[in-house]
């Protein structure tokens, strides 16, 4: 992978990780368009995902610090309840990751037809959420679990994680001001866990040709981190303003492009 390709992939990851248009789907598109091989890029994917996790930690630093401080007081306070709701939301993706990770990766990776279907589902989710009447419900434990199911389903490339979780919350009647924060915070531990597993895999003795040169790796990491910071803040603003319909239309267009690439590449 060249530095230019690394910067392009970092841009794709940083921007699309937080906007409701599926980072995995766009990484699949980028790999096809740039003619990159999956076996050559595992270390790079780990790096750029780590960069976007770091950008979330920066944006929500005060929220994370407050939650940790309240949680470790071991009292039934607001922070403890919020942390438990995040824990409940992680149950579906934990089950999917523990029992179906290998099957999911083998079945979904590089499949542009499934990527097209995922983009289509993202478009439907976002369009439905954009027309629903705004709710004012707090996120309950049941809502946390349902939103967690949406996050688990987003293993399908093209099906946006943030789009699925935020849209599901809006359809459940939750307050949009809270949904963006909850959506990003609930993803931190699952993404870190998946990243750790990929890191171990990319450095195991049984995996070959998965390491990238340092300079492209660094270029991709920095690009993903900086663009991730900007995209995360932008997404929070967009959710508060309720501007999701255009992303739904974009996902429909991405579904068509993915379908074309499936039959032509």
Image: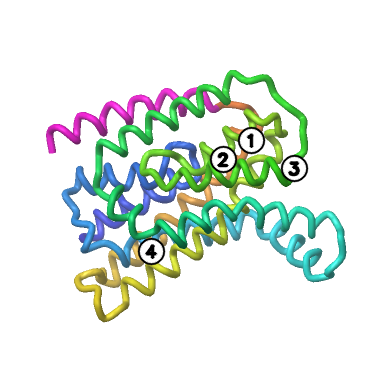
Left or right of 76 on screen, residue 249: left
Q: What secondary structure is the stretch in magenta mostly built from?
A: helix
Residue 62 at x, y = what percent? 72, 59
Rendered image quadrant of residue 128? top right
Q: Earlier in the sequence, mark 3 or mark 4?
A: 4
* Of the two numbered discs 4 and 1 in the rendering, the one whose residue sits closer to the viewer: 1
Between 172 and 123, the residue placed more toward the observer is 172
Q: Is residue 22 left or right of residue 5?
A: right
Label ID, residue 46: 4
Report the front residue among 47 and 136. Answer: 136
State which mark lies toward you, 3 or 2.
3
| Position above or below: 51 against 242 | below
- Specify the color scheme: rainbow
Span highlighted in magenta in the image: 244-265
Q: Which residue is found at the position 71% from the left and 52% from the top?
A: 85
Residue under pointer 2:
165
Lower sequence index among marks 1 and 3: 3
Quadrant in the picture for residue 217: bottom left
For the residues labelled 3 and 4, the Cα–Cα distance comes to 33 Å
Image point 20% across, 45% down: which residue? 32
Q: Which residue is mark 1?
A: 169
Q: Secondary structure at mark 2?
A: helix
The numbered mark at residue 63 is: none
Residue 157 image offset from top left, x and y in percent: 36, 43
State the CA–CA distance, disc 3 to disc 2.
14 Å
Which circle, 1 or 3, is nearer the viewer?
Answer: 3
Residue wearing tag 3 = 140
Q: Is residue 234 left or right of residue 209?
A: right
| Tag 4–tag 1 contact (CB < 8 Å) | no
- Distance, label 4 to label 1, CA atoms, is 28 Å
Is tag 4's residue or tag 1's residue first in the polypeptide sequence? Answer: 4
Q: Is residue 49 above or below residue 29?
A: below
């Amino acid at each position: 992978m060249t530095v230019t390709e690394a910067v392009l992939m970092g841009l794709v990851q940083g921007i699309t990780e937080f906007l409701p248009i599926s980072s995995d789907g766009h990484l699949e598109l980028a790999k096809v368009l740039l003619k990159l091989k999956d076996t050559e890029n595992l270390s790079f994917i780990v790096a750029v995902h780590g960069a976007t996790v770091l950008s979330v930690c920066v944006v929500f630093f005060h929220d994370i610090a407050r939650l940790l401080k309240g949680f470790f007081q071991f009292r039934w306070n607001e922070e403890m309840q919020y942390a438990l709701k995040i824990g409940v939301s992680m149950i579906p993706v934990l089950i999917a990751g523990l029992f179906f990770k290998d099957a999911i990766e083998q079945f979904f990776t590089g499949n542009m037809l499934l990527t097209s279907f995922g983009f289509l589902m993202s478009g439907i989710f976002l369009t439905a959420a954009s027309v629903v009447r705004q709710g004012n419900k707090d996120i309950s434990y049941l809502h946390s679990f349902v939103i967690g199911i949406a996050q688990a389903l987003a293993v399908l490339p093209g099906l946006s994680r943030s789009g699925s979780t935020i849209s599901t919350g809006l359809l459940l009647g939750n307050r949009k001001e809270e949904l963006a924060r909850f959506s990003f915070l609930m993803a931190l531990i699952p993404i870190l866990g998946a990243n750790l597993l990929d890191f171990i895999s990319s450095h195991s003795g049984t995996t070959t040709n998965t390491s990238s040169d340092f300079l492209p790796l660094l270029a991709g990491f920095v690009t993903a981190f900086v663009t991730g910071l900007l995209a995360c803040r932008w997404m929070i603003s967009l959710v508060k303003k309720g501007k999701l319909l255009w992303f739904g239309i974009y996902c429909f267009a991405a579904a068509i492009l993915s379908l074309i690439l499936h039959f032509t590449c």
